[in-house]
Image: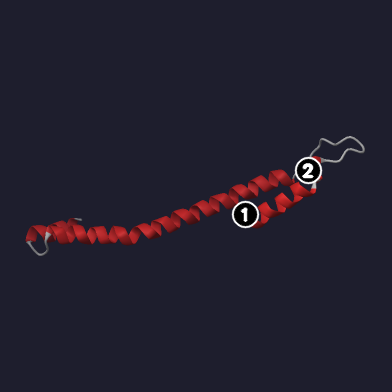
Amino acid sequence: WVYGGWLVIEGEIALGSLVAFTMYLMMIQMPFRFLGWMLMLEQRAKASAGRIFEILDETSEIRDKEGQESRLSSDYFQDFMMWIKEVFL
């Protein structure tokens, strides 16, 4: 802005040209900012998923009664966990 302002004061360029140039720079910059923001969100999601899966992979100290089937060993839950791991990791 300083150099552009100096050029406007000296009459080298019009004020509208300076504003237009600045707006063009912003228009070029925004897609790159958005891409960086999306990449940051992806990394945060991967890190969070990793921590969640660490907790889910822990074995429980609480045991089921003899002869009782665990709900966590059901096919539905296992299929769901495999889908989550494929999508997020």
Residue in the image at 89% along x and 34% along y: 65
Residue in the image at 11% along x and 59% along y: 8
Observer able to see residue 15: yes
Q: Look at label 1 and name its amino acid.
A: Phe
Residue in the image at 47% along x and 55% along y: 38
* Image position of 21 (left or right of 63): left
Label 1 Cα neighbours within 10 Å, binned few <14 / some 14-19 / many ≥20: few
Residue in the image at 53% along x and 54% along y: 42
Point out residue 43 in the picture as x, y percentages from the top left corner.
54, 53
Pick the front one: 72 or 12: 72
- Quadrant containing the N terminus is bottom left
Kindly identify which residue carries mark 2. 72
Point out residue 80 in the picture as x, y percentages from the top left corner.
71, 50
Q: Say which quarter of the image contains residue 18.
A: bottom left
Please tell me whether residue 72 is drawn above or below residue 17 in the rendered image.
Answer: above
Which residue is farthest left?
Answer: 11
